[in-house]
Image: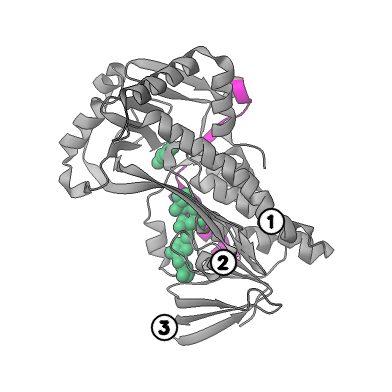
Amino acid sequence: MRTQVAIIGGGPSGLLLSQTLHRAGIDTVVLERRSKAHVLSRIRAGVLERGLVAQLEDAGLGARLQREGQPHDGTVLAHGEREIRIDFARHAAAHVTVYGQTEVTRDLYRAREAMDARLIFEVEDVVITGADGPSPEVSFQTAEGARTLACDYIAGCDGFHGVSRKTIPQTLRQDYEKVYPFGWLGVLSETPPVHDELIYATSALGFALCSMRNPTLSRYYIQCRLDDRPEAWSDDAFWDALRRRIPAAYAETLVTGPTIEKSIAPLRSFVTEPMQWGRLFLCGDAAHIVPPTGAKGLNTAASDVYYLSQALIGHYKDGDDAGLRGYSDRALARVWKAERFSWWMTRLLHRFPDQTAFDLKMQEAEVAFLSESEPAQAVLAENYVGLPY
Ligand code: APR
Ligand code: PHB
């Protein structure tokens, strides 16, 4: 087998890269470890920055997004009973779009299949060879046996647990990591959202987030202990804990119901440098992870895809390799700003086990300053709607 760009990973990064390159006349093959059904069963975040929306529209995926995506001009930060509305329209002249990542992935699969893309599912034993030479290859196993894919370039879009990052020799790589001492317990419920905008709430009992997928499907999270288990939480216990962490006005109007999904996600900040080695380029979770507090996971994967697709198009269309040479530096410049914002939102809104009385006073002062300072709110708005590519 041969292709121009071998893409390892059929999640949002790999699919968006494949779709963008295909529309530019560049051949790709996507290798995915799991089945398509498994990939589409994953519940992920649902806030799209304007840069990702523009990419999806340019890739021919704007129709359903326009129909079903919900524009949000602001969000609410709540500290106990104190509420601060961050006005994206006023401070950043922009909005975000609420549209589940699962739906983005579903739309990408539909578009890929409509273009007869080469997607190979349930691959095993993926091994990258020759990435630091002129003729890289990806070998893998399928039900039909051993296969080898020769290519010009490899995009490692295989997430945090993939093989791509680990293919770069550790002597050439620097990892940066911060693991947070808590997790998020999240539920989906077929109930109307408690508010028409997202509510990021913090209280003495910890963080809570009120989000949604559409007017009849809500997504809620509460901060939980790292050793907590979803099965230890009844629905009633979850709803009670949520009510006690959000302002009374919302707790009183919260519509509860049976949860249709309940899971716990750990929180981590992670970046590997560089994001390329020879003809191997890392995109998305393969290179970096953010705590979900700033809704930057998918959106930072999107800016990686933008930079890499532009670089590969420059190579194949104009013989210009400047983008490929500069990909890692350009992607990391934006990655680190997303890491900072996600870390800052997490530090501001969560209760840390080792927090001192002084630390708590610092959190209160930061929220108080945010509530009083238009420039401070503008900084949050600018980061939340998405920094420029
Ligand atoms: N070979 C082939 N595919 C692999 C391998 C492998 N060795 N290892 C992992 N994969 C696949 C996974 O099954 C997954 O479908 O790579 C894909 C990686 O997708 P994501 O983990 O979703 O990462 P990415 O596409 O970068 O999207 C980032 O997804 O996880 C969220 O919070 C994250 O919102 C962010 C977004
Ligand atoms: C979600 O809707 O799942 C969501 C929204 C915003 C976040 C994290 C998750 O910051």
Q: Residues under labels 1 and 3: Cα distance?
A: 35 Å
Q: Which label is found at residue 382?
A: none
Q: Which residue is mark 2?
A: 171
Q: Residue furthest top?
A: 372
Q: Amino acid at mark 3?
A: Ala
Q: Tell which tag, 3 or 2, sits nearer the viewer.
A: 2
Quarter location, residue 116? bottom right
Secondary structure beneath label 1: helix
Q: Amino acid at mark 1?
A: Tyr
Q: Residue at x 62, y 49 (%)?
A: 332
Checking the image for residue 327, the label placed there is 1
Residue where numbered disc 3 is placed = 143
- The numbered mark, 3 or 2, whose residue comes first in the sequence reads 3
18 or 83, nearer to the observer = 83
Residues in magenta, as a range = 91-115
Residue 293 position in % (x across, y down)? 43, 37
x then y, percent, for residue 291: 43, 43
Please rate how many residues cluster around mark 2, counting C-alpha atoms within 10 Å: few if below 14, some from 14 to 19, many from 20: few
